[in-house]
Image (tube, grey):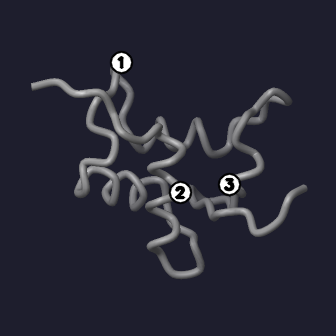
């Protein structure tokens, strides 16, 4: 049975990150957390969840909508931003 996702992917990412020490984790760790808890079950396309997370987290476009939520730590890791930039 298909159902609509209750959370958007960026909301699921925030839920995951608040459960990690220092509110930081790798894209793969975040994807595993989201998958285990079925926070974002309905996805489209042939892209892995960790790749989708990476695209949401570190996109360099000036129109990027989530820069206020996530900070790129490098080496495939992100954290929740603590302040507005």
Q: Do the residues labelled 1 and 2 touch (CB within 8 Å)?
A: no
- Can you give x and y, in whole percent of width and height, for residue 5 in the image? 33, 34
Outermost residue to the top? 45
Q: How far apart are marks 3 and 2 (CA)?
A: 9 Å
The circle drawn on residue 45 is 1
* Residue tagged 2: 14
Q: State which tag comes first along the sequence, 1 or 2.
A: 2
Q: What element carries label 3?
A: strand
Q: How far apart are marks 1 and 2 (CA)?
A: 22 Å
Q: State which tag comes first along the sequence, 3 or 2.
A: 2
Residue at left offset 86%, top offset 58%: 84
Using the image as rendered, state which of residue 70 and residue 55 is in the foreground.
70
Q: State which tag comes first along the sequence, 1 or 3.
A: 1
* Residue tagged 3: 70
Above or below, comparing residue 26 to residue 35 in the picture:
below
Q: Is mark 1 on a helix, strand or loop?
A: loop
Q: Is mark 2 on a helix, strand or loop?
A: helix
Left or right of 51 in this view: 80: right
């Amino acid at each position: 049975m298909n159902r609509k996702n209750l959370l958007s992917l960026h909301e699921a990412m925030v839920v995951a990150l608040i459960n990690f020490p220092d509110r930081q984790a790798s894209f793969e760790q975040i994807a595993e957390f989201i998958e285990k808890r079925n926070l974002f079950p309905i996805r489209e396309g042939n892209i892995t969840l960790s790749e989708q997370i990476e695209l949401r987290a570190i996109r360099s476009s000036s129109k990027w909508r989530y820069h206020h939520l996530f900070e790129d730590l490098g080496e495939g890791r992100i954290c929740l931003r603590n302040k507005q930039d």
